[in-house]
Image: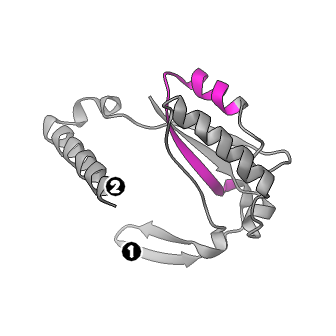
Amino acid sequence: MRVMVLIKADKDSEAGVLPSEQLLTEMGTYNEELVKAGLMLAGEGLHPSSKGVRVRFSGENRTVIDGPFTETKELIAGYWLWQVKSIDEAIEWLKRCPNPTGVESDVEIRPVYESEDFGEAFTPDLREQEDRLRQQIQQSSEQR
């Protein structure tokens, strides 16, 4: 199963405060462990919401809203995408993570939908399209 591990933003990350060399070193070591274990598929830190935008969908209308966004507790400062056997395995790995903020913080683990989760609505044609797109994504990333 794949899981998305979401590091929540705080006032410092939203202010653009960058991690210390020590935290970057600790996270680098942790990421190496994840890669060696075959778990880490992707992972990145995100710029503060002041550098982002939201696009609000309302029927056929699209409205662009410039950051920053006020609800810091709802914002994401970074993420990992992991391939694990279970949520329990993800929890065990996350417990080994350096504290991403150095203070009290929450990191959320959420399962990623897999094609079988959609049941009959995910028709053979849609499965074929999904497989084709995944192959194209893989080829594109290998060419970069």
- Residue beneath the point at 59% across and 28% down: 90
- The mark found on residue 40 in the picture is none
Q: Residues within 10 Å of mark 2 (few under 14, many from 20)?
A: few
Give yes or no for residue 84 being in the magenta stretch: yes
Name the secondary structure under disc 1. strand
Q: Which residue is mark 2?
A: 141
Image position, residue 114 (x, y; %): 36, 34
Question: What amino acid does circle 2 point to?
Answer: Ser
Residue 67 visible to the viewer: no
Among numbered discs 1 and 2, the one appearing first in the sequence: 1
Depth-wise, is mark 1 or mark 2 nearer the camera? 2
Residue 1 visible to the viewer: yes
In this rendered view, identify the residue nearer to me: 34 or 61: 34
Question: What amino acid does circle 1 point to?
Answer: Asn
Image position, residue 122 (x, y; %): 23, 36
Image quarter of residue 65 = bottom right
Image quarter of residue 128 = top left
In this rendered view, identify the residue nearer to me: 51 or 126: 51
Image quarter of residue 18 = bottom right
Give yes or no for residue 17 being in the magenta stretch: no
| 72 sits left or right of 103 in the view | left
Dividing the image into 4 quarters, which one contains the N terminus?
Answer: top left
As drawn, which residue projects farthest toward the right?
Answer: 103
| 103 sits left or right of 119 in the view | right
How many angstroms separate mark 1 from mark 2 (CA)? Answer: 33 Å
As drawn, which residue projects farthest toward the left?
Answer: 125
- Residue beneath the point at 58% across and 49% down: 79
Q: Which residue is mark 1?
A: 61
Q: Which residues make up the magenta segment? A: 74-94
